[in-house]
Image: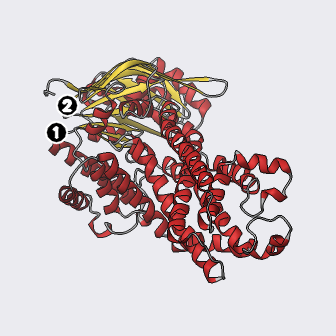
């Protein structure tokens, strides 16, 4: 495969799950291209189709329609060749808890056809890289969440795959463990020329790790680009004003709608959101208008566009609200 | 060739999970002995009923092959719990997305449960011998009985694995082991000569794979085996073992389709 061919190429992927009396359309004509040696962040709420996409690409699930190629091989017709080329780290732990870290790594190496000496050397290198050497010969069930997740990623890497799938690699980790794993991942992805497809709930994770971001919603791609391109599409800064109650917030939205230079005015609970080409110039005008109408303000903020704003812009929902809905 | 190495590596892994819980490994040895000594005492005097098989032998000698096969079947019926556990974690998905062959994943479970059942069988035989039971079949008899143990394990472990792959629920396995294996155990000559039971029990036993193993085991341990009966029963078991293993390996496709 030459470098000009995409490492992952997906066209019109469709998948419907049939539960007893209802059908759930998980993918609805998804298209995706990932260039060799790049990191793609697949972003979207639960049920958007992220995991289904990864499962199909890793040959674990069959699409109803559409075509997908990974490392140049068709995921349905040439599944065995795909399996030799990929590393797959699912949302759930891929290690056996009654085996040690080293045993899990060495088994993975052997299953991928590496020789005994090669496997030992690579396992040791990965244990060192992920700071797991001291715990290498302890059972995985004694590992902390962060250590176990690092081991999962190491297992996915032991045979130096040309394409690595990471399905929510840092979900459930504390911020410190997450930051550590990010540091490892960006170093590894940078060094190896490996292609990485990463699904995530965390916008800052995609911002930090991904060369390209694809936002999916309801089984379709809603937008794609580099994190910077996506933020630049939004033209201008985000303004937020926190108000004492939901009623006051909708009153404030009425006021904001009449302020020149503000666009995309919306209310999200007790928070007023809007965009402005020049946030620093427009925010004082908005605050003055609110004061003139006697609307009390708790706090106000101004921010360069974030991926959260991109997400809101394309799906009509904020990422935080989406996650809160999932947790509820 | 790689299918063989994969099978060996995955079997070694299965052995680690058992051996690392010594209490569990110990229970697997003690359980069959409880059956042997409990049933041996409970039904001690049935050998005195006129018409009971094997005149001149003790009830302990009669039930030893029954307990050996019972242990193998009960153990094998739980084989699927390893698959349920692996699919609750991401381990099964990892294996299926790796070059590991499906046959190797399936066989490693069957092989490991066969090893456990063979060890249990030898312990049961040894304890029965210490309690005074004698087996005229000698070493060739014991080896042929172990063939029966392995074939029976393949049949029930493959069935358990197939159920596990299709349902991915521990509860479904409870169904297999409670609703299926216990009636099969009593619809056989494991603890009672079926000629003394209701006529339909003897008829049912002839179609019961568990009874095939018990009959073959008892014959080969005895002094004058009916070789036609032995090879017939072992042949049926072997054919069923092949079919069940093939079905259980095919169940990976259903697993893939439903996920």
- Which of marks 2 and 1 precedes in the sequence? 2
Q: Few, some or many C-alpha atoms within 10 Å of disc 2 (few <14, some 14-19, many ≥20)?
A: many
User: The C terminus of chain A is located in which quarter?
Assistant: top right
Chain letter for mark 1, please: A
The answer to whether any part of residue A90 appears in the image is: no
In the rendered structure, the residue with mark 2 lies on which chain? A
- Disc number at residue B27? none
In this picture, is A258 found above or below A188? Answer: above
Residue at figure coordinates x 20%, y 56% from the top left:
A122
Q: How far apart are marks 1 and 2 (CA)?
A: 8 Å
Return the residue nearer the eye: A178 or B145.
B145
SS under mark 2: loop
Classify residue A66 as left or right of residue A235: right
Residue B47 falls left or right of residue A27: right
Q: Please tell me how crowded label 1 is: few (under 14), some (14-19), or many (20+) other residues with Cα within 10 Å.
A: some
Which residue, given by chain and number where applicable, does mark 1 sit on? A193
- Which residue sits at x=57%, y=68%? B121
Residue A26, position in %: x, y?
Answer: 50, 25
Rendering quarter of residue A128: bottom left
Viewport quadrant of the N terminus of chain A: top left
Q: Position of residue A98 (x, y in %)?
A: 44, 63
Q: Could you tell me which residue is drawn at 56 percent across and 36 percent down? A: A325
Looking at the picture, how far across and down is residue B7, in whole percent?
38, 52
**Label 2: which residue?**
A36
**Secondary element type, mark 1:** loop
State how many labels appear.
Answer: 2
Q: Nearer the viewer, residue A146 or B216?
A: B216
Residue at image position (38%, 27%) is: A215
Q: Do the residues labelled 1 and 2 touch (CB within 8 Å)?
A: yes
- Residue A249 in percent (x, y) is at 55, 30
């Amino acid at each position: 495969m030459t470098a000009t061919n995409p490492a992952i190429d997906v066209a019109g992927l469709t998948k419907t799950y049939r539960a007893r009396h209802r059908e759930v359309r998980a993918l609805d004509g998804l298209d995706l291209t990932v260039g060799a040696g790049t990191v793609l962040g697949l972003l979207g709420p639960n049920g958007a189709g992220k995991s289904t996409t990864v499962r199909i690409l890793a040959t674990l699930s069959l699409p109803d329609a559409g075509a997908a190629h990974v490392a140049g091989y068709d995921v349905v017709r040439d599944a065995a060749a795909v399996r030799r080329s990929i590393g797959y780290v699912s949302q759930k732990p891929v290690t056996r808890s009654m085996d040690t870290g080293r045993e899990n790594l060495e088994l993975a190496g052997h299953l991928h056809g590496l020789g005994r000496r090669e496997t030992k050397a690579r396992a040791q290198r990965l244990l060192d890289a992920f700071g797991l050497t001291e715990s290498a010969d302890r059972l995985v069930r004694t590992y902390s969440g962060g250590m176990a997740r690092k081991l999962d990623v190491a297992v996915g890497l032991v045979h130096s795959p040309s394409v690595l799938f990471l399905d929510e690699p840092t979900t459930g980790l504390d911020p410190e463990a997450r930051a550590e794993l990010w540091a490892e991942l960006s170093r590894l992805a940078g060094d190896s020329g490996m292609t990485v497809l990463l699904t995530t709930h965390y916008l800052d994770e995609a911002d930090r790790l991904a060369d390209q971001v694809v936002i999916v919603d309801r089984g379709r791609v809603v937008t794609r680009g580099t994190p910077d391109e996506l933020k630049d599409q939004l033209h201008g800064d985000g303004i937020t004003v926190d108000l004492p109650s939901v009623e006051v917030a909708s009153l404030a939205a009425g006021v904001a709608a009449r302020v020149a230079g503000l666009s995309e005015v919306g209310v999200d609970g007790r928070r007023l959101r809007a965009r402005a080409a020049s946030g620093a110039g427009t925010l004082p005008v908005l605050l003055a208008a609110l004061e003139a109408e006697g609307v009390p303000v708790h706090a106000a903020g101004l921010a360069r566009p974030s991926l959260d704003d991109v997400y809101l812009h394309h799906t009509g929902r904020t990422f935080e609200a989406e996650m809160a809905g999932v947790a509820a | 060739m790689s299918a063989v190495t994969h099978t060996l590596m995955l079997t070694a892994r299965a052995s680690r999970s058992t051996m690392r819980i010594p209490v569990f490994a110990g229970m697997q040895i003690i359980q069959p002995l409880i059956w042997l000594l409990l049933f041996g005492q409970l039904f001690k005097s049935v050998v005195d009923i006129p018409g009971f098989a094997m005149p001149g032998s003790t009830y302990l000698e009669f039930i030893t092959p029954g307990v050996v096969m019972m242990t193998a079947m009960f153990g094998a019926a739980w084989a699927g719990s390893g698959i349920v556990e692996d699919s609750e974690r991401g381990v099964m998905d990892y294996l299926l997305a790796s070059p590991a062959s499906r046959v190797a994943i399936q066989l490693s479970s069957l092989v490991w449960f066969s090893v456990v059942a063979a060890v249990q069988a030898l312990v049961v035989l040894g304890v029965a011998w210490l309690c005074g039971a004698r087996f005229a079949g000698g070493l060739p008899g014991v080896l042929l009985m172990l063939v029966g143990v392995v074939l029976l394990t393949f049949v029930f472990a493959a069935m358990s694995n197939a159920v596990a792959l299709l349902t991915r629920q521990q509860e479904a396995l409870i169904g297999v082991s409670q609703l299926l294996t216990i009636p099969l155990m009593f619809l056989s000559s494991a603890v009672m000569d079926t000629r003394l039971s209701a006529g339909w029990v003897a008829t049912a036993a002839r179609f019961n794979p568990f009874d095939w193993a018990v009959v073959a085991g008892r014959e080969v341990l005895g002094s004058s085996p009916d070789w036609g009966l032995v090879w017939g029963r072992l042949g049926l078991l072997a054919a069923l073992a092949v079919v069940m293993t093939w079905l259980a390996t095919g169940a990976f496709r259903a697993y893939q389709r439903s996920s």
